[in-house]
């Protein structure tokens, strides 16, 4: 994790033109996000948007029984809180920190005001929303039609794409909750991947040793989500490299 931080570590913020970024930058507050922190609850009034830099946030749908499953993940490519500018202000899902790190927090009212200016910020946010919808749709199809091992490989690859390291601080129980499957299923799938030399697992830590092995065993859902995000943001011009860090 970098010792210094910059909004440019988030791809959406890094892609804003200078004028639009200057309007928002004084109001962006860097906040640490601990593992398991709930950014918003189902049906709750949303007050802030979060632009992750090193953290990853999981969007969950929670059933009446308390069971839940991830519908999408948000990392340094996006923003948590699309309901703020889409007009809903609430959502039946929850947002929980999946990988600890940092994000820039912005008052939801200011994000909505910038969106309503109908400039490039609106264009970028709408494109990102389409990419997020694709991820949600593909996750639903994947959970219905593909094996637990394929789902695990897809989830690991999407998580790795948002990280600067190949090691995740994550228990098998938490992964099972993310995918909405039994823990025993994750234990078996992770065991097969470990035996194949693709991952290394010890309690609370998963290290990916061979990414190509994950890509071979994953279903097509990973590639669909990755390609759609790249397609929608392929013509974005960044003010600075998204990996640029303030000094």
Image: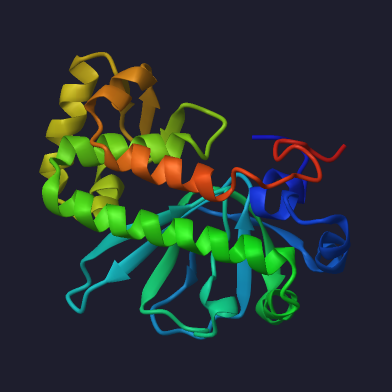
| Residue at the image point whose x is 22% and y is 74% from the top | 63
Q: Does 18 sit above or below residue 171? A: below
Q: Does 68 sit above or below residue 172? A: below
Where does residue 226 sit, x and y in percent of width and height? 43, 41
Q: Which colour scheme is used?
A: rainbow
Left or right, residue 139 beside residue 5: left
| Residue at the image point whose x is 37% and y is 73% from the top | 93
Q: Does residue 37 show up? A: no
Where does residue 54 sit, x and y in percent of width and height? 60, 44
How many labels were placed on the picture? Answer: 0
Q: Quadrant of residue 152?
A: top left
| Residue at the image point whose x is 59% and y is 48% from the top | 233
Q: Does residue 41 show up? A: yes
Q: 218 or 165, which lies in front?
A: 218
Where does residue 219 sit, x and y in percent of width and height? 23, 36
Left or right, residue 83 beside residue 201: right
Q: Does 44 sit above or below residue 68? A: below
Q: In which quarter of the image is the C terminus?
A: top right
Where does residue 145 sit, x and y in percent of width and height? 12, 48
Q: Does 214 sit above or below residue 144? A: above
Q: In which quarter of the image is the N terminus?
A: top right
| Residue at the image point whose x is 40% and y is 84% from the top | 43
Left or right, residue 13 beside residue 27: left
Left or right, residue 41 beside residue 172: right
């Amino acid at each position: 994790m970098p010792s210094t931080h910059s909004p440019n570590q988030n791809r959406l913020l890094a892609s804003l033109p200078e004028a639009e970024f200057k309007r928002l930058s004084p109001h962006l507050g860097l906040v640490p996000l601990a593992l398991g922190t709930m950014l918003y609850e189902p049906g709750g009034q949303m007050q802030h948007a979060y632009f992750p830099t090193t953290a990853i946030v999981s969007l969950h749908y929670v059933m009446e029984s308390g069971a839940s499953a991830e519908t999408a993940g948000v990392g340094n490519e996006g923003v948590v809180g699309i309901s703020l500018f889409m007009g809903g202000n609430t959502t039946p899902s929850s947002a929980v920190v999946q990988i600890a790190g940092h994000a820039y927090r912005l008052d939801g009212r200011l994000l909505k005001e910038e969106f309503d200016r109908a400039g490039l910020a609106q264009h970028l946010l709408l494109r990102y929303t389409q990419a997020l919808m694709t991820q949600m749709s593909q996750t639903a199809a994947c959970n219905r039609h593909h094996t637990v091992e394929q789902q695990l490989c897809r989830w690991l690859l999407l998580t790795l794409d948002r990280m600067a390291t190949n090691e995740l601080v994550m228990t098998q129980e938490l992964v099972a909750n993310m995918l909405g499957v039994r823990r025993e299923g994750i234990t078996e799938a992770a065991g097969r991947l470990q035996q194949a030399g693709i991952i290394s697992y010890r309690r609370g830590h998963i290290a990916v040793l061979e990414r190509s092995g994950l890509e071979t065993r994953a279903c097509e859902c990973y590639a669909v989500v990755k390609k759609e995000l790249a397609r929608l943001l392929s013509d974005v011009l960044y003010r600075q490299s998204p990996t640029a860090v303030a000094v």
